[in-house]
Amino acid sequence: MAKAATLRWVEVATLDDLWEGEILDVEVDGQIVLLAHLPGGKIVAYQGICPHQEVNLADGEFDEDTAILTCSAHLWKFDLSTGEGVNPKGCRLYRYETRVEEEVIYVGYPPEETRRYNRCRENEEATA
C-alpha cells in the first residue's frame, strides 16, 4: 500500500450515513467505491463494481456477522474484512485506504493510479 502522505484523500460520507453492519456506494473521482462498516467499527473501502461482470456490489447481500458480501448478479462472494474472493478464490477487490476524522469518512488512493479496480473471470486469477 502507498504511504499516507502520497495519497489523495476524498471526503465521501459521515458515520451517520454508514451505520455499523451496513454498506454504501459512493463516487470517488469518477469511480464507484463500496464502503463497509464492519462489526467492531472498522470502515473499509473497495472497488464498487464486481470484478466479474461489473455489477454494482452495493446491490448485493452483506452478512455483517461474517463480513461476506454476495454479489447480486452471479452470487460471487467477497470477504470485506480482506477484499479476498471467497467464491471464487483468487479474485481480489481493489482496496482503498480509509480514515475517519470527527465523524467524517475519507477514502484515499495514490493519485498516479488511474486504474483502481480488478477484473476476474471464473477460473482465472485476478488482475491487478
Image (cartoon, grey):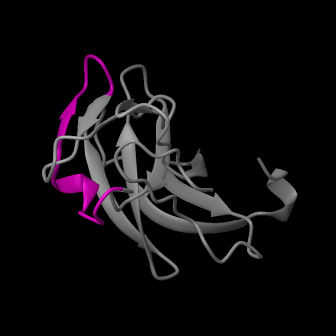
> Where residue 19 appears, x then y in whole percent?
28, 39
> Where residue 9 appears, x then y in whole percent?
66, 66
Task: Tell me what residue is drawn at x 47 percent, y 51 percent.
Answer: 46
| Residue span colored magenta | 52-67
> Where residue 68 appears, x then y in whole percent?
29, 28
In this view, the residue in front, 89 or 10, is 89
In this view, the residue in front, 62 or 52, is 52
Establish if 83 lies above or below 51: above
Task: Tell me what residue is drawn at x 13 percent, y 49 percent.
Answer: 72
- The answer to whether residue 17 of the structure is visible from this angle is no
Establish if 17 lies above or below 54: above
- The answer to whether residue 59 of the structure is visible from this angle is yes
SS assignment for the magenta stretch, majority: loop
Q: Is residue 8 left or right of residue 2?
A: left
> Where residue 127 appears, x then y in whole percent?
58, 55
Establish if 31 lies above or below 40: below
Task: Tell me what residue is drawn at x 28 percent, y 63 percent.
Answer: 53
Q: Is residue 46 left or right of residue 72?
A: right
Q: How many marks?
A: 0
Q: Is residue 13 left or right of residue 1?
A: left
Query: Hey, which residue is sitting farthest front in the picture?
Result: 123
Residue 34: quadrant of the picture: bottom left
Q: Quadrant of the C terminus?
A: bottom right
Query: Hey, which residue is sitting farthest bottom in the picture?
Result: 30
In this view, the residue in front, 69 or 17, is 69
* Magenta span includes 122: no
Task: Tell me what residue is drawn at x 50 percent, y 53 percent.
Answer: 105
